[in-house]
Amino acid sequence: MKPGIHPDYHPIKVTMTDGSEYTTRSTWGKAGDNLQLDIDSKTHPAWTGGQQQLLDRGGRLSRFQKKFAGFIKTGGEAASPPAKKEDKPAPKAEKPAKKK
């Protein structure tokens, strides 16, 4: 390594939102500093799944839930495919008569 161009890599203490602590090495702060986290994997909805409310705008959510209602497995049961719409085939257009 070329001397003088790399940042100082030193031990710091990280404090999680629940108060638990661990020691790691970082270029942040000075040796022995304490990094207090505002967000961590124990509390943030990105990791925990959260309890967010989904808004139904224009019926999109209800259409999605109806379409995939039986798709998710529950317990030991096998998943069934999503319900399909019963579409009637479009009537075939008649060909015009050929002129001789």
Image (cartoon, rainbow, N blue to C red):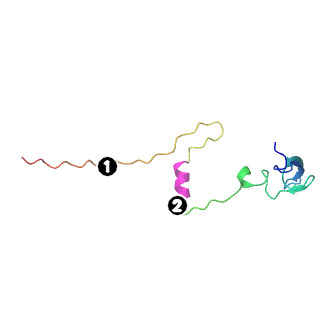
Q: Quadrant of residue 18?
A: bottom right
Side of 57 relative to 36 (left or right): left
Magenta part of the chain = 59-68
Residue plotted at (89% across, 48% down): 10
How packed mark 1 is, by other alpha carbons closer than 10 Å (few <14, some 14-19, many 20 or more), is few
Side of 93 relative to 82 (left or right): left
Give x and y (percent) for residue 84.
Answer: 46, 46
What secondary structure is marked by label 1?
Answer: loop
Question: Pointer 2: what residue?
Answer: 59
Is residue 34 among the parts visible in the rendering? yes
Extreme residue in the bottom direction = 57
Q: Nearer the viewer, residue 59 or 15?
A: 15
Residue plotted at (64% across, 41% down): 74
Q: Is residue 77 above or below residue 9?
A: above
Question: Pointer 1: what residue?
Answer: 90
Give x and y (percent) for residue 27.
Answer: 84, 51
Quarter of the image that includes the N terminus: top right
Q: Nearer the viewer, residue 74 or 96?
A: 96
